[in-house]
Each structure stands twice: as C-alpha cells, then as structure tokens.
Image (cartoon, grey):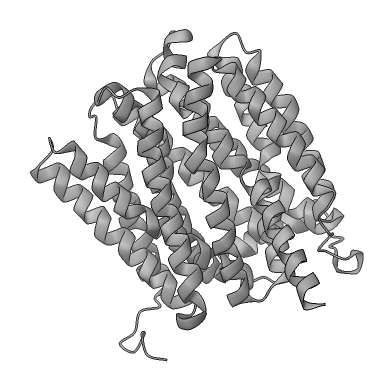
Amino acid sequence: MKNSSNKSTTLLIIALSMLTAFAPLSVDMYLPSLPMLAKIYDVNEATIQLTLSSFLFGFAVAQLIHGPLSDRWGRKPVIFLGITIYIIASLGVIFSSKVEAMIFFRFFQAFGGSAGPVIARAIVRDTFSKDKSSQILSILFLVMSMAPLLAPLIGGQILYFFGWKYIFITLIIFSFICLILTFGIRESLPKTSRSKIGFFSILIIYKNLLLHKKFIGYTLCMSFGFSGMFAYISGSPFFIIDYLNFSPQLFGFFFFINVLFLIIGSTINALFVNKYGSEKMLFIGISLSAIFGIFIFLNILIYPKLNYTIIFFITLFMPSVTITGANATAAALNLFPKNIGSAAAAIGAVQFMIGGISGYVVGELYFFTFYSMAIVIGISGLLSFFSYIFILRRISLNFFSR
C-alpha cells in the first residue's frame, strides 16, 4: 500500500513538473534566436524583447482567471482548456509575418500555458501539508529546472539545423504530451469542496488577498527574486551573444551553468526545509539575494570591465531564487486554504507581472548600458530582501533558535 502511494506521488510530481515547464520552455527555448529574430523582423533589441515581455504579461493576466475557474470547475478542466489555447496560439506564432503579430500570439500562448503552473501549485497544496508542500515544491522546482537547463541548448541546436519556427513546432509536440499526461492526473479538488461564487465575489477574494499583509509580503519576496531571473532571461542573449560575441550554441552553455545553480538552490531547500522549517529557509534565500545583489552593484561600480566576474556573481545569485520561491509560495498558499486556486493565481500574476516589467526595463536600459541586465538583477535581490524586512517584519534576535 505504501509502495503504491509512493509511486502515485512520484507520477504526480512528474506530471505537475511537465505542466509547470510550459513557462521555462516557452521562454528559454527561443532565447538563442532573439538576436536573429531582431534581424529577420528588422527591429531593435527592445522591440524583439517585447515578444518575451508580452508572454510574461499574458502569463500574469491569465492566472487571475485560471485560479478562480479551477476553484469552481476543478483543476483538470482548466488544464485542458489552457493547453488547447496554447497550441492554437503557438501555430499563430509560427505563421506570424510581422513582429506585432508575434507579440500578439505570444501573449495568448502565455494565456493558455499559464494554466499549467498555477494549477500545479494548487494541486500540491490540495494534497500536502505546509512543510510537505514546501518540500514537494522544491522537488517540483528542481525537476522543472531541467527545462530551462536543456531548453537553450536544444533551442540553439534546433535554430542551427532547422530554423526558429521549428522551436515552436517542438513546443506544440510537448504540449500534446502534456495533454495526454493530464488524463492520468487524479482530480485533487472534490466537487463538494468547489467554490460556487460569482464574478464579483472573485474580485472580493483578490482584494482580500492583495490587502493581506503577510500574503503580499511573501508574494513580493518571491516575485522580486524571480524578477532577477527574468532580467537574466531577457538580457543574457544580447549580453552574451552580441556584446561578448559568443555563438547561440555557446550561449546555451552559459545558461546551463546558471540553471544548474537554480537546481542547487532547490536541492539545498529540499534537504534542509524539514530540519529548519520554511521560514528560516526563506530568510536564508532572501539574505543570499541581497548579498549577491550588492556584489553585482560593487562589481559594476568598481570594476565595470570585468564581465566574467559579473556573470560569476549573477550565477551565485541564482540559488536564492529557488530557495526563496519554494518557501514563500508555500507560506503564502497556507494563509488561504479555502481559496488556494485564487491564491496561487494571484502569486503567479504578481510574479510574472513584475518579471515582465523587469524584462522591459532591461530592454530599454540596453540602449544606455550593456550592464542593464546586471543592474536589474542587483535591484531585484535587494527588493526581495526589503520586502521581507519592511512588510513581513519577521526578524527577531532569537530567529534562529528553535
């Protein structure tokens, strides 16, 4: 019986990880093609980066809808609807003749794909306790991190041998696999537990979520940490390929290293969260983000031409993203056990909205400095820490005593 339960949990984690991978695959696989797409569509770096920002904004907006719908209809129907929209929008991206059309379809590609991660988080909280949720989310982030680890490498090779359109054809194939896997997921929200509230009641729920001090504090801690990662995603193709003159294939190697450190962060959290608790691990995560955010700033101010040390500090920043993300998400969801879907949606919306803004800022600042990516990453790390200090106010002299 126990072996059957363990097997069921393992299969659930695999399925949820693939659903959550919609975002990193859709973002990271086409990153090596960004400089080439700018030339194909005859636009500047800031304009082509809007294909990334529009995706992040689409992810943000849609999660506000998917969350309440999953609370009302159940988790699985919303996943089916989201994947269908994703497939249709991906076809639109492939046949886009103008950059404006690509930006438009990228928004709706995200609109559909966002169902995966928001519902995956809700299913985890439906099924597990707070500390166990944090552990499962760490494993989920760990497995999910394999997507951005491999995506630029795969995308670079697809770009080299076949062209950029085949990157999105690959994503369509992946989405069909996820659609099949979804049939094997057990519905985690029983009909007796589903919400029957209307549209205006949903707005009230979101108002209550966003006015809850602890909820917004945890959400901002996580979101600012992730905005540093989104800044890297947005700026690294141009910094590494255009400024440092590396090939798209070698860009995948640099990306590989940074995602490897994201995985290290997830692994550390999964190993120690049961011993120290999610609150202490969260404090460790936001402290690391602040420390390396400061190091990045000092590097730019004192030794601006040492590009590789900037990349080194950005790499060391990455574990803080997954450590903070797993624990802040688990803590925020635990505050609203009766509205987990809506809470997960609000978290994702804020996360991707701030991520979209950070990506846009990187693109605009790129006209003035090649270090726009590093500057935004440093600011993100400090904002994550300050969100903890000034909103949650969880620091005390005996914080590390049990």
Residue for point 32% across, 54% down:
317
Q: Where is residue 351 in the image (x, y as percent from the top left)?
A: 52, 50
Horizontally, residue 321 falls left or right of residue 8, namely left
Quarter residue 221 falls in: bottom left
Q: Residue at x 49, y 75 (%)?
A: 273
**Dividing the image into 4 quarters, which one contains the C terminus?**
bottom left
Q: Foreground: 270 or 88?
A: 270
Q: Can residue 222 be seen in this view?
A: yes
Total number of numbered discs in the rendering:
0
Residue 335 position (above or below residue 104): below
Measuring from the top left, give residue 355's x and y in whole percent.
Answer: 47, 43
Q: Quadrant of residue 192?
A: bottom right
Q: Against 389, is 251 above or below?
A: above
Residue in the image at 64% along x and 52% along y: 17
Q: Position of residue 298 (x, y in %)?
A: 15, 50
Query: Between residues 384 and 317, which one lies in front from this camera angle?
Result: 317
